[in-house]
């Protein structure tokens, strides 16, 4: 067995995988145009192998005008030429497998791009033509139809309806370039089945399903009577017009049956921002294998809050025979190194516009992020690591306004800078026009401090975050256990500690004073590069056995 293989076990791979998320546009550029691509990913597969991840998830790489970073798909069976070709994607899937790494691709079933052949056909058709029924295209209100069909709002801000030249309106829960498809139309379901098959036939091991809980809509399109902004953004409203509706589940069952008809352990994980009460419904044995749990990602650096999220998540997953998922970061949120450097309770979506900017303590943020990594990587279930987390990369929260690309910036009327700050290209080397990301400057500018975070700068430096991740993932393999329960340990009000079935203990110190460690026989990893045998400093974590 190579040092990177998991020990032999009957447990399906995804139940305890470390899944590394690649945002292809910003990972590595192979053709020198400043945009990351598949050639770049193929040239950096050894990084993933050295890190010791079990799987990789690729954000959308399909043909797209990139109005929303590729979540606006023109053709699900083609790779955008900026990212490569279908042949390269197929080769990458095979190469990842040769490295012992499983592959998950992103599926975007809630909406297409407005450039998708279906939408172009719909726009060019007359009102009432059946091809319009693949989307939600309706006449407007008012005498001349100049008012939208209802008062629904877009997740990105502003109205959720856009008017076509012939006067009808189409629904877009996200950007206007992302028209929502109509899942009541049987052609839609057939088409997405075919797309899933297309990628399964190319060897992928799973799918990350985008905005998985909003596919079905209330087709009476009612107005929202009270506080439309609050209702539209809440996932706790019974019979919500589009979040978490009961009729989304038959779609999931259909996909699950399709996946199960393939050999191997194919899986699907849902991006579903649902309430704790309905979360388990998505994990029924004939539905999703996993649902992202974003509770920890949304939590502050708070012992009690994190402890209760952890116990609830473990219990909730166990109750339905699934496993918890742990996520601290992804391409949609401020990186945790920066989040944890802000006072608890800060709204990090608006902070980078409103400040106060001197409330950020980057060293504290990094210390906590390293401890949080130890926390999630010792828990049962699978952990999702977003590219750059293993480098301790900070959010680039002060990108110049003129380079901002995320539609959130404009649609929020500049109240939120959006998500570009976590999508800045990865630094590989300590110099060059984009620190080894490309031969030229990257599509978003990197700050000078990225040199110090480069893979080259951290490799072989034992105190670095990269080496900490490598040691931690190696230890996770060595001390991995199929036992999916934890026992919380009482080490004081400001200490979060738990024990796995094999005796592995993770201890995190949330206090502002040092903690005397309890007895142990071996220290396995420590988030503090200056960890001693007996004392755990504030905002630090250790694994002991
Ligand atoms: C998901 C994606 C996000 C995208 C949105 C619309 O939330 O993670 O990046 O903007 O869906 O597709």
Image: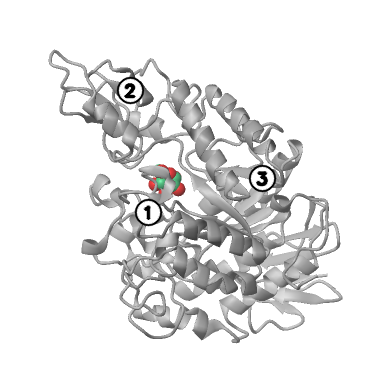
Residues under numbered marks 3 and 1 in contact, where contact means CB atoms less than 8 Å apart = no
**Crowd tier of the residue under label 1, counting other residues whose Cα lies within 10 Å: few below 14, some 14–19, many 20 or above:** many
Q: Say which residue label 3 marks.
A: 266
Image quarter where the C terminus lies is bottom right
Residue at 63% in and 85% down = 462
Q: CA distance from mark 2 to mark 3?
A: 33 Å
Image quarter where the N terminus lies is bottom right
Residue 37: x, y in percent?
A: 42, 64
Q: Is residue 292 visible?
A: no
Out of 8 and 418, give the one closest to the viewer: 8
Q: Say which residue label 1 marks.
A: 80
Residue at 55% in and 55% down = 57
Residue 416 versus residue 34 in the image, above or below: above
Mark in front: 2 vs 3: 2
Out of 2 and 356, give the one closest to the viewer: 2
Q: Is residue 305 visible?
A: yes
Disc 2 residue: CB within 8 Å of ligand 1 = no
Residue 327: x, y in percent?
A: 57, 54
Disc with the residue nearer the chain's start (2 vs 3) = 2
Element type at mark 2: helix
Q: Say which residue label 2 marks.
A: 131
Q: CA distance from mark 3 to mark 1?
A: 25 Å
Q: Would you say 160 lies left or right of 345 here?
A: left
């Amino acid at each position: 067995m190579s040092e990177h293989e998991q020990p032999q076990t009957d447990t399906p791979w995804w139940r305890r995988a470390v899944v590394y998320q690649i945002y292809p546009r910003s990972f590595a550029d192979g053709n020198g145009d400043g945009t990351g691509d598949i050639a770049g990913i193929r040239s950096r597969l050894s990084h993933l192998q050295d890190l010791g991840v079990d799987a990789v998830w690729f954000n959308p790489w399909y043909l797209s005008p990139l109005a929303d970073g590729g979540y606006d798909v023109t053709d699900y069976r083609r790779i955008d030429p900026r990212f490569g070709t279908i042949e390269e994607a197929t080769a990458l899937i095979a190469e990842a497998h040769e490295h012992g790494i499983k592959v998950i691709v992103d599926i975007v079933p809630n909406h297409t791009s407005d450039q998708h052949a279906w939408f172009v056909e719909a726009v060019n058709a007359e009102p009432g033509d059946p091809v319009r029924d693949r989307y939600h295209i309706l006449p407007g209100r008012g005498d001349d139809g100049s008012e939208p069909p209802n008062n629904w709002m877009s997740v990105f801000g502003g109205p959720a309806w856009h008017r076509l030249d012939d006067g009808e309106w189409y629904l877009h829960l996200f950007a206007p370039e992302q028209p929502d498809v109509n899942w009541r139309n049987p052609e839609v379901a057939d088409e997405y089945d075919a797309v899933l098959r297309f990628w399964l036939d190319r060897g992928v091991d799973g799918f990350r399903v985008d905005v998985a809980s909003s596919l079905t809509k209330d087709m009476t399109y009612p107005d929202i009577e009270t506080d439309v902004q609050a209702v539209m953004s809440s996932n706790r409203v019974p019979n919500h017009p589009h979040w978490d509706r009961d009729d989304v589940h038959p779609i999931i069952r259909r996909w699950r049956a399709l996946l199960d008809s393939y050999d191997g352990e194919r899986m699907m994980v849902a991006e579903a921002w649902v309430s704790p009460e309905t979360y388990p419904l998505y994990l029924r044995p004939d539905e999703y294998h996993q649902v992202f749990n974003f509770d920890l990602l949304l939590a502050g650096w708070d012992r009690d809050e994190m402890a209760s999220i952890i116990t609830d998540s473990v219990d909730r997953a166990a109750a339905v025979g699934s496993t918890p998922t742990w996520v601290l970061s992804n391409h949609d949120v401020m990186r945790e190194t920066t989040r944890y450097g802000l006072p608890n309770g800060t709204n990090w979506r608006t902070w980078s516009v409103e400040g106060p900017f001197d409330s950020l303590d980057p060293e504290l943020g990094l210390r906590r992020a390293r401890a949080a990594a130890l926390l999630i990587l010792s828990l049962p279930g699978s952990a999702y690591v977003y590219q750059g987390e293993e480098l301790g990369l900070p959010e680039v929260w002060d990108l110049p306004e003129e380079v901002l690309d995320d539609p959130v910036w404009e649609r929020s009327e500049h109240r939120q800078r959006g998500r570009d700050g976590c999508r800045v290209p990865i630094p590989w080397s300590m110099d060059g026009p984009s620190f080894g990301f490309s031969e030229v400057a990257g599509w978003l500018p990197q700050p000078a401090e990225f040199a110090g975070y480069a893979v080259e700068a951290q490799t072989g430096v034992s105190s670095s975050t990269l080496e900490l991740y490598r040691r931690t993932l190696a230890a996770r393999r060595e001390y991995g256990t199929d036992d999916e329960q934890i026992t919380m340990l009482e080490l004081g009000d400001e200490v979060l500690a738990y024990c796995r079935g094999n005796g592995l203990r993770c201890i995190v110190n949330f206090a502002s004073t040092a903690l005397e460690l309890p007895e142990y026989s071996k220290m396995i990893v420590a988030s503090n590069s200056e960890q001693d045998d007996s004392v755990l400093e504030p905002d630090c974590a250790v694994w002991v056995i």
